[in-house]
Amino acid sequence: MASAVDTFMAGVIAKNPEQKEFHQAVEEVVESLIPVLDKHPEYRKAKIIDRIVEPERVIMFRVPWVDDQGEVQVNRGMRVEFNSAIGPYKGGLRFHPSVNLGIIKFLGFEQIFKNALTTLPMGGGKGGCDFDPKGKSDNEVMRFCQSFMSELFRHIGGDVDVPAGDIGVGGREIGFMFGQYKKLTRKFEGVLTGKGLNWGGSLIRPEATGYGQVYFAEEMLKTRGDSLKGKRCVVSGSGNVAQFASQKVLQLGGKVLSLSDSAGFIVDEEGIDEKKLAFVMDLKNVRRGRIKEYVDKYPKASYQATDAGAKSNPLWDVKCDVALPSATQNEINVEDANHLVKNGCFCVSEGANMPSTPDAVNVFIESKILYGPGKAANAGGVAVSGLEMSQNSMRYGWSREEVDQKLHSIMKSIHKVSVDTAEAYGTPGNYVNGANIAGFLKIADSMMDQGVV
């Protein structure tokens, strides 16, 4: 006989065919919520889960722009405004060739719960486009961003929907989009986060996701009387999240062994120190080069190309104590998870969104290692986005120390509520259940208060 989860998922899949990442994100949450629904039949009666998995609004639009050769290019833009029960829609924009509706819906769905965990008044949303900023000139990126915002501007606003950056969308892209929004609306408001410091941005925002991911790892380690000091850490990715996760690991006394990009990864057994990290930041943020150039500068390190179609990624076979996946979704499969556990890894803190497949998550949970899922461990980024919104509303800016202190405090709070909720619902130490249930309860109660809307 089909379980309640199987029956529910059959309906979700029938309604949203071919959206595999979205199905995966929904199933992972719904599996956690069965004990909550048994305890609170009023949520079942009000069809809270049925309503949460259905976005309030999906906007799709064409984005025509002209490249440097004078050729017209056409991309597809989208914004999924998923849930506004506790605040304006909030979530990033992703510019990457892989972007499709299923990926944006998975990200937006995760964002609902992540934002609820931050304690800040933010709903869940996500957006993006199948545009690839890699290899494009600044002028091409500007023309694309202006065209993208020429449609998106009518659907967003400081009290309506506040996008941010994600993969492919950094300070440059946010700047071009904000300029176009301001021109079209004649409003200077906190409509995008991740802005430049001179025009409404927040200190610590670029660092926030990576710092928060490491703060969460440190809190998990504390539950076992341990810390990051002296720990061997494997980091994937080499973008914003990976860079600042590495920086915070170094500040807390850990050793960073690796970084990667879509082509391959480097391993430096001597450790990637502050000087080497500064080289990577210049390589990736300024020169927009490939991570393999690291070994030209530091020949004692090794580089290995990766094959996207391979059974496993050898990066996760590097001996480590702590794994910090900070690249993209489903980068750790069941083989990779088994390699990590076999090699002595006892703490995984996710900086990317849903970087572990369901089978990999099961390996971590069954092995009783410390496992912080993305919606809890990487919530630092959106938390500081929320703090940026607060500063914009007040026309005021906090110091670097104040923002970092607030971020640290929020990550401790997310850790505590995840631990306490997991315990309260009979699965002590299970951060997946704890985070899912804690986020759900806040949203569900808000939806109940606001009626069937």
Image (cartoon, rainbow, N blue to C red):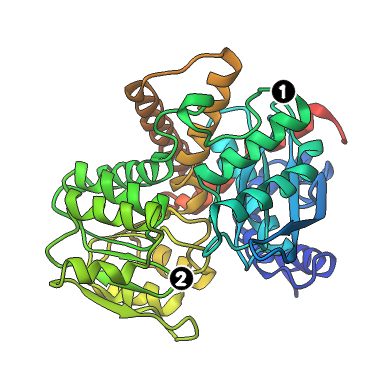
Q: Read off the residue under disc 1.
A: 187
Characterize the local packing of mark 2: few (<14), some (14-19) or many (20 or more) Cα atoms within 10 angstroms. many
* Residue 168 locus on image (x, y percent): 54, 55
State the residue in front, 211 or 147: 147
* Residue 135 locus on image (x, y percent): 52, 65
Quarter where residue 16 is shown: bottom right
Disc 2 marks a residue whose amino acid type is: Ala
Q: Read off the residue under disc 2.
A: 360
Residue 364 as seen in the image, left or right of residue 376? left
- Spatial CA distance of label 1 from label 2 is 46 Å
Rendered position, 112 above or below 325: above
Q: How many marks?
A: 2
In the image, farthest residue toward the right: 452
* Residue 172 locus on image (x, y percent): 52, 44
Secondary-structure class at tag 1? loop
Disc 1 marks a residue whose amino acid type is: Lys
Give the residue drawn at x 19%, y 48%: 274
Residue 318 as seen in the image, left or right of residue 207? left
Q: Can the viewer see residue 440? A: no
Rendered position, 302 above or below 36: below
Secondary-structure class at tag 2? helix
Q: Earlier in the sequence, mark 1 or mark 2?
A: 1
Give the residue drawn at x 74%, y 41%: 83
Q: Report the quarter where the C terminus lies.
A: top right
